[in-house]
Amino acid sequence: MKSDLFSGEHLVQPASAPGMSVQNAKSIRYVVDGEMLARQGSMIAHRGSLQFERKGQGVGGMLKRAVTGEGLPLMTVRGQGEAWFAHEAQNCFVVDVEPGDVFTVNGRNVLCFDATLAYEIKTVKGAGITGGGLFNSSFTGQGRLGLVCDGTPLVIPVSHHQPVFVDTDAVVGWTARLSTSLHRSQSFGSMIRGGSGEAVQLKLEGEGFVVVRPSEATPQKAQQA
């Protein structure tokens, strides 16, 4: 059989080492030798001897998800083999988390990660009780974290001299040394007249980086997060 479909560009090559790697722009490959974690329903193919088990969030995690629509629905993958993960044909990226790092990520952008990473669903400081992204997942430890983003993300430096304001529906994540608060960018009078559609943003201050998707989350995708 002859076709460009079977060219080296698309053909999966033998794995060189255990762990996570970007297979292509839309998928991540994980060579499992033990255990790893992934977003529920994100496995698109696998081979070898692998088991997939739903991982509970605990009472606190379920409560946060019920109240806010945010959360991190996970499955544990155990055994020896290979698995490929993707989500809605979004672009895939891998972040190396080192000891001492803290990377805060919106749950809708998490695809998979090493079992050596610890995560905790936390309240975004300064977010009050309203606004998108009220609860995000903070990752610590040492390992690799696979992310998805609808489009190619922007990575914006933040400094003490120049804070960054991000739409709460567009933020993907940010690094440890940034503080957050809500910022209202339009007057009460403007809101009465219908508003600009950009009433409240997440303000990030300090030294670090914020990752932003090039579009706002639609209501349907926000509910699926």
Image (cartoon, grey):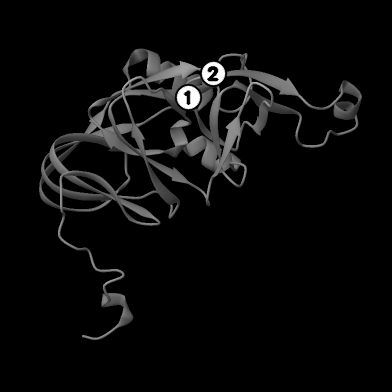
* Numbered mark located on residue 106 in the image: none
What residue sits 60% from the left and 19% below the top? 180
Percent of width and height locating residue 89: 43, 55
Instruction: Estimate the x, y position of residue 208 in percent, counting from the top left.
Output: 53, 27
User: Where's the N terminus, which quadrant?
Assistant: bottom left
Tell me where residue 117 sits by quadrant: top left
Residue 124's disc is 2
Q: Relative to the observer, which residue lies in front, 214 or 88?
A: 214
Tell me if mark 2 has few (under 14), some (14-19) or many (20+) residues whose alpha carbon lies within 10 angstroms of its own: many
For mark 1, give the secondary structure: strand
Of callouts 2 and 1, the N-terminal one: 2
Residue 165 position within the rendered picture, expressed as x and y whole percent measured from the top left: 68, 30
Q: Residues within 10 Å of mark 1 (few under 14, many from 20)?
A: many
Count of numbered tags: 2
* Residue kind at label 2, given as amino acid type: Val
Q: Horizontally, is 80 left or right of 125 in the view?
A: left
Residue 83 vertical position relative to residue 96 in the rendered view, above or below: below
Does residue 38 sit above or below 158 in this rendering?
Answer: below
The residue tagged 1 is 136
Q: Is residue 25 above or below residue 4?
A: above
Query: In the picture, residue 63 is in which quadrant?
Result: top left
Instruction: Say which amino acid is labelled 1.
Output: Asn
Residue drawn at 33 percent across, 22 percent down? 57
Q: How far, Cα to Cα, is label 2 from label 1?
A: 7 Å
User: In the image, what residue occupies the spot 35% across and 31% down?
Assistant: 73
Disc 2 and disc 1 in contact, CB within 8 angstroms:
yes
